[in-house]
Protein backbone atom coordinates (compact mmCIF):
# COMPACT_ATOMS: atom_id res chain seq x y z
CA UNK A 1 0.00 0.00 0.00
CA UNK A 2 1.26 3.48 -0.89
CA UNK A 3 1.72 5.84 2.04
CA UNK A 4 -0.80 8.68 2.03
CA UNK A 5 1.33 11.82 1.91
CA UNK A 6 1.64 15.04 -0.12
CA UNK A 7 4.26 13.62 -2.48
CA UNK A 8 2.05 10.69 -3.47
CA UNK A 9 -1.49 12.08 -3.30
CA UNK A 10 -1.38 15.85 -3.93
CA UNK A 11 1.79 17.03 -5.70
CA UNK A 12 1.29 14.84 -8.83
CA UNK A 13 -1.96 16.75 -9.53
CA UNK A 14 -0.80 20.26 -8.59
CA UNK A 15 -0.22 21.38 -12.20
CA UNK A 16 -4.04 21.54 -12.46
CA UNK A 17 -4.41 23.84 -9.44
CA UNK A 18 -5.11 27.57 -9.88
CA UNK A 19 -3.14 29.98 -7.65
CA UNK A 20 -5.00 33.00 -6.26
CA UNK A 21 -3.18 35.90 -4.52
CA UNK A 22 -5.02 37.85 -1.83
CA UNK A 23 -4.09 41.51 -1.38
CA UNK A 24 -2.89 42.91 1.95
CA UNK A 25 -6.04 44.96 2.62
CA UNK A 26 -8.12 41.78 2.39
CA UNK A 27 -5.69 40.00 4.74
CA UNK A 28 -6.18 42.81 7.28
CA UNK A 29 -9.96 42.57 6.89
CA UNK A 30 -9.83 38.81 7.50
CA UNK A 31 -7.60 39.36 10.55
CA UNK A 32 -10.08 41.84 12.10
CA UNK A 33 -12.98 39.48 11.34
CA UNK A 34 -11.27 36.47 12.93
CA UNK A 35 -10.32 38.46 16.03
CA UNK A 36 -14.00 39.32 16.45
CA UNK A 37 -14.97 35.65 15.97
CA UNK A 38 -12.34 34.62 18.51
CA UNK A 39 -13.78 37.09 21.00
CA UNK A 40 -17.30 35.59 20.63
CA UNK A 41 -16.69 31.85 20.00
CA UNK A 42 -15.11 30.67 23.28
CA UNK A 43 -18.58 30.71 24.87
CA UNK A 44 -19.77 27.91 22.54
CA UNK A 45 -19.44 24.36 23.90
CA UNK A 46 -17.64 22.89 20.86
CA UNK A 47 -15.06 25.71 21.01
CA UNK A 48 -14.47 25.13 24.72
CA UNK A 49 -13.36 21.64 23.69
CA UNK A 50 -11.32 22.69 20.63
CA UNK A 51 -10.28 26.34 20.88
CA UNK A 52 -6.51 25.89 20.46
CA UNK A 53 -6.43 26.41 16.69
CA UNK A 54 -9.51 28.62 16.28
CA UNK A 55 -7.69 31.61 14.75
CA UNK A 56 -5.77 29.54 12.18
CA UNK A 57 -8.81 27.46 11.26
CA UNK A 58 -11.09 30.46 10.69
CA UNK A 59 -8.34 32.46 8.96
CA UNK A 60 -7.65 29.60 6.55
CA UNK A 61 -11.35 29.03 5.86
CA UNK A 62 -12.13 32.70 5.28
CA UNK A 63 -9.04 33.12 3.09
CA UNK A 64 -10.24 30.19 0.95
CA UNK A 65 -13.74 31.62 0.62
CA UNK A 66 -12.36 35.03 -0.40
CA UNK A 67 -9.97 33.40 -2.90
CA UNK A 68 -12.88 31.52 -4.48
CA UNK A 69 -14.87 34.77 -4.76
CA UNK A 70 -11.93 36.33 -6.62
CA UNK A 71 -11.40 33.24 -8.80
CA UNK A 72 -15.07 33.00 -9.81
CA UNK A 73 -15.62 36.76 -10.01
CA UNK A 74 -18.60 36.64 -7.63
CA UNK A 75 -19.44 38.15 -4.26
CA UNK A 76 -21.41 36.68 -1.38
CA UNK A 77 -19.42 33.55 -0.61
CA UNK A 78 -17.73 35.01 2.49
CA UNK A 79 -20.22 35.57 5.28
CA UNK A 80 -18.78 38.41 7.37
CA UNK A 81 -21.40 37.97 10.11
CA UNK A 82 -20.38 36.76 13.57
CA UNK A 83 -22.79 34.55 15.49
CA UNK A 84 -23.58 31.10 16.80
CA UNK A 85 -21.94 28.30 14.78
CA UNK A 86 -25.20 26.37 14.39
CA UNK A 87 -26.59 29.29 12.37
CA UNK A 88 -23.76 28.89 9.82
CA UNK A 89 -23.89 25.13 9.27
CA UNK A 90 -24.87 25.17 5.57
CA UNK A 91 -23.18 24.97 2.19
CA UNK A 92 -20.64 27.76 1.66
CA UNK A 93 -21.95 28.57 -1.83
CA UNK A 94 -25.63 28.57 -0.84
CA UNK A 95 -25.80 32.39 -1.12
CA UNK A 96 -24.86 32.17 -4.80
CA UNK A 97 -27.33 29.37 -5.48
CA UNK A 98 -25.07 26.31 -5.33
CA UNK A 99 -25.28 23.54 -2.74
CA UNK A 100 -21.49 23.17 -2.47
CA UNK A 101 -19.05 23.59 0.39
CA UNK A 102 -15.46 24.80 0.50
CA UNK A 103 -12.68 22.98 2.31
CA UNK A 104 -9.48 24.97 2.63
CA UNK A 105 -6.46 23.51 4.36
CA UNK A 106 -2.97 24.78 5.05
CA UNK A 107 -0.20 23.47 2.81
CA UNK A 108 1.16 20.19 4.17
CA UNK A 109 -2.18 19.06 5.59
CA UNK A 110 -5.10 17.16 4.11
CA UNK A 111 -8.63 18.61 4.06
CA UNK A 112 -10.78 17.70 7.05
CA UNK A 113 -14.26 16.55 6.04
CA UNK A 114 -17.25 14.90 7.67
CA UNK A 115 -17.09 11.10 7.59
CA UNK A 116 -20.39 11.12 5.70
CA UNK A 117 -20.60 13.88 3.08
CA UNK A 118 -23.96 14.96 1.71
CA UNK A 119 -22.67 17.78 -0.51
CA UNK A 120 -19.86 18.31 -2.97
CA UNK A 121 -16.85 20.32 -1.74
CA UNK A 122 -14.40 22.61 -3.50
CA UNK A 123 -10.95 21.67 -2.22
CA UNK A 124 -8.42 24.44 -1.70
CA UNK A 125 -4.93 24.72 -0.21
CA UNK A 126 -3.62 27.78 1.61
CA UNK A 127 0.02 28.45 0.79
CA UNK A 128 1.73 30.97 3.07
CA UNK A 129 -0.53 33.77 4.29
CA UNK A 130 -1.64 35.34 0.99
CA UNK A 131 -2.00 32.54 -1.53
CA UNK A 132 -4.62 29.88 -2.10
CA UNK A 133 -4.68 27.06 -4.63
CA UNK A 134 -8.09 26.17 -6.07
CA UNK A 135 -7.59 22.42 -6.48
CA UNK A 136 -10.97 21.33 -7.83
CA UNK A 137 -14.39 19.96 -6.96
CA UNK A 138 -14.79 16.71 -5.05
CA UNK A 139 -18.16 15.09 -5.58
CA UNK A 140 -19.74 13.67 -2.43
CA UNK A 141 -19.19 10.08 -3.63
CA UNK A 142 -15.45 10.78 -3.93
CA UNK A 143 -15.37 12.46 -0.49
CA UNK A 144 -17.02 9.41 1.04
CA UNK A 145 -14.61 6.99 -0.63
CA UNK A 146 -11.15 8.60 -0.30
CA UNK A 147 -10.80 9.31 3.38
CA UNK A 148 -8.63 8.25 6.29
CA UNK A 149 -8.75 9.04 10.00
CA UNK A 150 -4.94 8.79 10.00
CA UNK A 151 -4.90 12.20 8.27
CA UNK A 152 -6.46 13.93 11.29
CA UNK A 153 -3.53 15.47 13.15
CA UNK A 154 -5.45 17.02 16.06
CA UNK A 155 -6.01 14.35 18.76
CA UNK A 156 -9.06 16.22 20.13
CA UNK A 157 -10.70 16.28 16.71
CA UNK A 158 -9.87 12.63 16.08
CA UNK A 159 -11.34 11.74 19.49
CA UNK A 160 -14.67 13.36 18.55
CA UNK A 161 -14.96 10.80 15.72
CA UNK A 162 -17.09 12.89 13.36
CA UNK A 163 -14.44 13.98 10.86
CA UNK A 164 -11.77 12.40 8.70
CA UNK A 165 -9.12 13.44 6.17
CA UNK A 166 -9.67 13.53 2.39
CA UNK A 167 -6.96 12.32 -0.02
CA UNK A 168 -8.68 11.74 -3.41
CA UNK A 169 -7.01 14.63 -5.27
CA UNK A 170 -6.66 12.58 -8.46
CA UNK A 171 -10.48 12.58 -8.71
CA UNK A 172 -11.03 16.32 -8.38
CA UNK A 173 -12.91 17.99 -11.22
CA UNK A 174 -11.27 21.20 -12.42
CA UNK A 175 -13.15 24.32 -13.47
CA UNK A 176 -12.14 27.81 -14.60
CA UNK A 177 -15.27 29.86 -13.99
CA UNK A 178 -18.72 29.87 -12.42
CA UNK A 179 -20.40 28.57 -15.57
CA UNK A 180 -18.16 25.49 -15.70
CA UNK A 181 -18.74 24.88 -12.00
CA UNK A 182 -22.53 25.02 -12.48
CA UNK A 183 -22.34 22.50 -15.35
CA UNK A 184 -20.27 20.09 -13.26
CA UNK A 185 -22.75 20.26 -10.41
Image (spheres, rainbow, N blue to C red):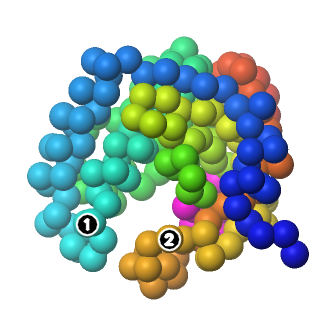
Q: Identify residue for label 2.
A: 153
CA gap between label 1 and label 2 equals 15 Å
State the predominant SS element of the stretch in magenta.
Answer: loop
Instruction: For residue 150, say whether it is visible.
Output: yes
The verdict on residue 116 being magenta is yes
84 and 14: which is toward the camera: 14
Q: What is the x, y in percent for residue 31?
A: 24, 35
Choose top left, top right, bottom left or bottom right for residue 72.
Answer: top right
Q: Residue furthest right?
A: 1
Give the label on residue 179, or none: none
| Residue in the picture at 59% in, 41% down | 124
Task: Classify mark 1: residues with Cα within 10 Å, few (<14), some (14-19) or many (20+).
Answer: some
Task: Classify mark 2: residues with Cα within 10 Å, few (<14), some (14-19) or many (20+).
Answer: some
Judged left or right of residue 117, residue 34 is left
Q: Residue furthest bottom?
A: 159
Span of residues in magenta? 111-119
Judged left or right of residue 8, residue 134 is left
Sequence-wise, the earlier of marks 1 and 2 is 1
183 and 167: which is toward the camera: 167
Image position of 166 with respect to 58: above or below: below
Judged left or right of residue 7, residue 102 is left
Label 1: state its secondary structure. Answer: loop
| Residue in the picture at 62% in, 76% down | 149
Q: What is the x, y in percent for residue 78?
A: 39, 33
| Residue in the picture at 83% in, 49% down | 171
Choose top left, top right, bottom left or bottom right for residue 143.
Answer: bottom right
Q: What is the x, y in percent for residue 184?
A: 79, 34
Q: Identify residue for label 1.
A: 51
| Residue in the picture at 30% in, 71% down | 50
Image position of 76 with respect to 154: above or below: above
Amino acid sequence: MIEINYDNFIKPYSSNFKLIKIDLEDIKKIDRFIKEIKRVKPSENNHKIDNSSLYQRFFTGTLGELALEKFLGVEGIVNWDVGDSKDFHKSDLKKIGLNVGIKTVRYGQFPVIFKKSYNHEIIMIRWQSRYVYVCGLAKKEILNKYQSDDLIMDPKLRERGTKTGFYGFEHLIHFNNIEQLKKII
